[in-house]
Image (cartoon, rainbow, N blue to C red):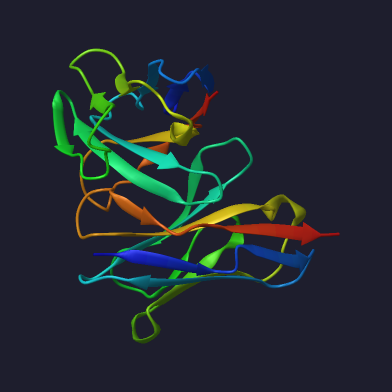
Amino acid sequence: NAGVMQNPRHLVRRRGQEARLRCSPVKGHSHVYWYRQLPEEGLKFMVYLQKENIIDESGMPKERFSAEFPKEGPSILRIQQVVRGDSAAYFCASSPEQGLNTEAFFGQGTRLTVV
Amino acid sequence: AQSVTQLGSHVSVSEGALVLLRCNYSSSVPPYLFWYVQYPNQGLQLLLKYTTGATLVKGINGFEAEFKKSETSFHLTKPSAHMSDAAEYFCAVSASHGNKLVFGAGTILRVKS
């Protein structure tokens, strides 16, 4: 029974390149959340998606960042034209439904380093 | 708006000693409160959560936390620390729906032998 799978675990990009982070939720989960963890800080909410829909993107930077959760396949967090400040750990979480009686399961994260 | 303050970015205890990790929250709506643990290079694992009902919540690995509305606190305790408890602990608060969480900055727990 696989948990949330994120890949790659580590990603190095040069400034100006694109970064694509993938998240496969727990089988049967249709809700996905992305968080960013900067060094020595807690996780910050970025975006909440259901299948094919963005529900809440209040934590997403206005430029260069986008997310999707297609009907088939993993959720993708895309960062265009990366800058050094994008270096962080990006975590994905999934849950089977909305609501606090359900637990969100976290992946192991993707650690992005921009050089 | 909601926020979480974790007092003490690093806490060190001896093996067998009481563990106390402090968390204070701010919320304009009834809060839902969580504690997560993160081991190095791992994701977050839920320790326990408070939604409604009993204010003393028991979680995994012998941890528990008490919701105190008057003090806006949700401190995490464990009577006797074990070496395997060494990790980073995050307190989080959520609005009344969904799993959109606001996290504190984390507390790194060190356990000395």
Q: How many circles with numbers are drawn on the protein?
A: 0
Dividing the picture into quadrants, the one containing residue A91 is top left
Residue drawn at 60 percent across, 63 percent down: B9
List x then y, in percent, for residue B40: 64, 40
Quadrant of the frame with the C terminus of chain B: bottom right
Work out whether residue B106 or residue B89 is closer to the camera in this orientation and state it.
Answer: B106
Quadrant of the frame with the N terminus of chain B: bottom left
Q: Is residue B54 above or below residue B108?
A: below
Residue drawn at 24 percent across, 31 percent down: A63
Looking at the image, residue B104 sits to the left or right of residue A49; the answer is right
Looking at the image, residue A93 sits to the left or right of residue B109; the answer is left
List x then y, in percent, for residue B93: 34, 61
Q: Is residue A78 above or below residue A87?
A: above
Q: Is residue B74 visible?
A: yes
List x then y, in percent, for residue B51: 30, 64
Q: Residue furthest right?
A: B113
Dividing the picture into quadrants, the one containing residue B79 is bottom right
List x then y, in percent, for residue A70: 20, 17
Dividing the picture into quadrants, the one containing residue B83 is bottom right
Residue drawn at 38 percent across, 16 percent down: A18
Q: Is residue A28 above or below residue B32?
A: above
